[in-house]
Amino acid sequence: MIIDPRFTQLAQGLTGFSTRLGKGERVLVDAFDVPDAMVIALVRAARARGALPYVQIHRARISREMALGAEEAQYVSLSEIELARMRQMDAYIALRGSENIFEAADVPSSRVQLVSRLMKPVIDHRVNKTKWVVLRWPTPAMAQQASMSTEAFEDFYFRVCTLDYARMKPGMKALAELMRSTDRVHVTGPGTDLRFSIKGIGAKECGGQYNIPDGEVFSCPVRDSVEGVVQYNAPSVYLGSSFDNIRLVFRKGRIVEASSSSTRRLNEILDSDAGARYVGEFALGFNPHILEPMRDILFDEKIAGSFHFTPGQAYGNAATATSPRSTGTWSASSAPNTAEGRSGSTASWSAGTGCLSPSRSTGSIPTTCLRAARERPRGTQARSRPMNPAPPRSLDSFIQALPKTETHLHMEGALPYELLRTLDPDLYPDDPEFRRETYRYPTFPNFEQTLLRHALPWYTSAERYHEAARVIFAGHVRENVRYVETSFHLHVTEFIHVPGPVIIDAILSAAPPGLEVRVFAGMLRNAYDGPLRAAIDALPGWEGLAGVDLHGFEEMPTEPWSFRVWERVAAAGKVTKCHAGEFTGPARVREAIQQLGVRRVQHGVRAIEDPAVVSLAADLGVTFDLCPLSNVRLRVVPDLASHPIRRLMLAGVNCTVSTDDPLCFANSVNGEYAALAGQAGFTRSELAQVARNGWSVADVAESERRARLAEIDRLAGT
């Protein structure tokens, strides 16, 4: 079965970062209305880590039918059976889809409470005794809740659920330390004036280990300390019922008044047991990709800048003798309105704060943790909820917003490392030395051997090219890259016995909507002397081929066949490229321009050593497709501050920026732009010009080019 690479990537995160499955560990995969392919991806990912997967499949309509006729004796037995199984498990992964979020709306409250009460020991054991993670599954129903198209919501879902949660750790730690040192909390906002204590309770950081999506730090109020009123501005769905405009009034920790769009149903839930009218959790959310409520609490409680206040049971690590016990936990969140606060022994937050600012020596919380970006995910609709005007864009937001291109990317060298690890996690460790930022390759042959040793075990079929391309292109979409030129190594077709046009089709068919992809055939300077001669002669007629690229070890001479083939390919209306001026001097750049006739030089950085070659490139409108971080890692330049990109641009050479071989450099397009700003001092205006340069050579309709250039001009304020 060919599995969507996004499923594979998600499964690897769930079995790796979230549950850290080890050899011989038992994991229960609990799948509720989830595609078989995702369950299979989880089974494969668990096995790849040496774990033993067990699977249970649920269907919402069947679960509803069971709950409608639930009897105590029946669920006592079921609870015993499920608890016995759960006690055999080391880990638990639940994926919960729903074609109809209101499927259980007509199940009587008495039946719901009976099921919750009798199944509680199973949930308690799972939460307290296993490594667990729970997540929703994207469905058209969820897309409808979010006011998005199904496709746009799926892209949003996988972007949120597969982000690098480890990067949140420093910010989460700072926020948790602030909450642990806090006694009194005062939350204010429209309709909200809430005071309580969290002294001595502690705080827990949540960064992808328990829920996906994630991004919160939670604590628990001291039981009797909660006083005041909270007015939630985000809707909620619980046990199949919808609740809007929830308003809760507290006295001595207890909810004494509760109203909403379904007041009767709300109070039935709060009266289900003695603990349900007390609060079991107080948390602040900060997932930078979740900006709007969508009636799904696993998403809504992570809204950047939100807080949530949860009636019901506290988690064991936040519960104390002062915390009530309840059969259930129900979260309702309040989304951002204002951003204000102070730290110290008393902490104040406006309802839905987006940041905290220090007033004492405790220090500030890193903005990477709490910054709430204002860009709306594509496909969402504006809501009527009031919001303060967006602050000026940060540099990261500016880079993200730029519509970018990638015009120098080797498909084999772009293999996502997480895909490679699915082949053998022991052989391919999490953090190999060659991918670290500080690593420098001793020589180009050393780099080339590293690349081939890691790429070739994956690229064994057209299906593998397709799967890798899907993940690669999904990364481009996440970074707002709209156009990609990538090459595949023609010599691989000889090794795996797959024709080049088949590989081209496999790559092109992986391109998602909104991303234009062009595929080039890359070959070595001596490629014509072997069995590839017939394929090379046929290149001008290959359907779907955008052009050709001469690459590899630059010290090899450019052989006469190249000039003939490049001329024929250009005559067929395709683009010709050549790697030059990376490890050899400006003479190779001149050769590429004047003898091969290319107007697209890959790298070209050492042209700066000869002003005449720089002038030649500028006068003929030649583009240098540069890869600055690659140049640093391969010792072409000592650092980015020494890189000649700015001098080349000032001399009139059209320079683009790309990643080259991110398998070996662990870089990205946005990372390249950020590095130019941070290490080479590029201004926003200069970064915008780099983006324009890419669109100036992109093989797109003129209307598309004009639209993207105008978009860049608006962002740059020109």
Image (spheres, rainbow, N blue to C red):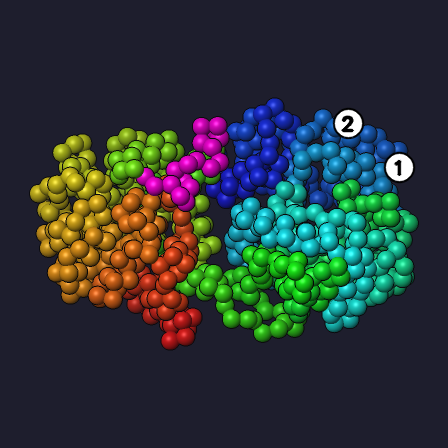
| Tag of residue 72 | 1
The residue that appears at 81% across and 63% down in the rendered structure is 195
* In the image, residue 143 above or below residue 449: below
The residue that appears at 29% across and 45% down in the rendered structure is 635
Towards the viewer: 273 or 402: 402
In the displayed structure image, the side of residue 160 where residue 708 appears, left or right: left
Q: Crowding at label 2, few (<14), some or many (≥20) Cα neighbours within 10 Å?
A: few
In this rendering, the label closer to the viewer, 1 or 2: 2
Q: Point out the residue furthest to the left here.
A: 560
Disc 1 element = helix
Give residue 446's position: percent from left, percent from top. 29, 34
Magenta stretch secondary structure, dominant? loop
Q: Amino acid at mark 2?
A: Ala
Q: Is residue 627 visible?
A: yes
Q: Point out the residue furthest to the top here.
A: 24
Towards the viewer: 135 or 140: 135
In the displayed structure image, the side of residue 699 where residue 298 appears, left or right: right
For disc 2, the marked residue is: 84
Give residue 92's position: percent from left, percent from top. 67, 35
Quarter residue 182 falls in: bottom right
| Tag of residue 481 | none
Q: Point out the residue furthest to the bottom here.
A: 718
The residue that appears at 83% across and 53% down in the rendered structure is 222
* In the image, residue 594 above or below residue 558: below
Q: Is residue 515 visible?
A: no
* In the image, residue 198 above or below residue 34: below
Q: Which residues are magenta?
A: 424-441
Does 86 appear in magenta? Answer: no
Towards the viewer: 144 or 9: 9
